[in-house]
Image (cartoon, grey):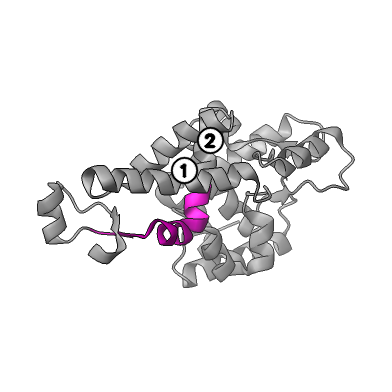
Amino acid sequence: MTQEECPALYKALYSYKKALLHRLEQLIEYRREKESEWVFASVAYLVGRYGGSCTTWQTNREYLSAVGLIRLRKPTEKTTAPALKDSFQRAEKGRQAVIWYTIPDYTPNRLAQAEQAAERFRQEGINRKGLTKQGIIIAVGRKEANKTVIDWRSRSGKDRAAEREIIRQIKMAISRKGYATKERVIERSAKRIKTICKLDYIEALYSIRQIWANRNRRILSMAGASYHRPTRAEKERFRLKDNGWIITPAQLF
């Protein structure tokens, strides 16, 4: 692949100090260590093995899948392989399913399709930083987005508990200080869900981040809140030192 042949894909892979290309190389390296076609690697495992953050690995992997440079598999009730079947059972219970992927052959046709997908992302102004399912839907369509976004749980009791906890943390923070910050809400919610749902912290944090990314509008509406940059009056009232986004009661914005 050259810059002349695949300009949009080349730019995506080599941007941010070749960060996305580096992640792809790590997935390929890990794939070569296994004998089976499909390889499982959770976000938490990839972070522990190669470094980085859960959010970065999640969005990078989803972008690579959306443009077709890796293939993901969602376990179903018809799955017969023991490990894949276990993944489906975990998902049914509301836990994070194990991620399975493989690396396809990078034929000229495959790279041409990847270039077309990368170009659609570019035209829509959507990059992998902060990538959401809605962004993938806009760029490549809902069918491909459903194959790409790794959230295979049913809306279980654990999922609903996580939503309720995020809303509770928003309301508690606003009650105490008049406003909340997204990161503080996510951090405190993850700690509570870790205990309530008996998850490890990384899994709880990943779950909370996924829920916020995919359903923050619904959550904010249910909490009667809005998420925005602070006004001058709010900066003075809350003694804020920067213009970082805050969550306040909806009527104040």
Q: Which residue is mark 2?
A: 204
Q: CA distance from mark 2 to mark 1?
A: 12 Å
Residue extent of the magenta highlight: 209-229
In the rendered image, residue 38, in percent from the top left (x then y), is placed at: 78, 40
Instruction: Check residue 165 in the rendering and tell me which mark sits there, or answer none.
Output: 1
Q: Quadrant of residue 68?
A: bottom right
For the residue pair 155 and 43, the one nearer the viewer reads as 155
Disc 2 marks which amino acid? Ala
The question of residue 85 being in magenta is answered with: no
Instruction: Check residue 71 in the rendering and tell me which mark sits there, or answer none.
Output: none
Report if the CB atoms under discs 2 and 1 are less than 8 Å apart: no
For the residue pair 244 and 16, the one nearer the viewer reads as 244
In the rendered image, residue 250, in percent from the top left (x then y), is placed at: 30, 63
**Residue at horizontal 59 percent and vertical 46 percent from the top:** 159
Disc 1 marks which amino acid? Glu
For the residue pair 31 and 74, the one nearer the viewer reads as 74
In the rendered image, residue 28, in percent from the top left (x then y), is placed at: 66, 39
| Of pointers 2 and 1, the one earlier in the residue sequence | 1
Q: Is residue 204 visible?
A: yes
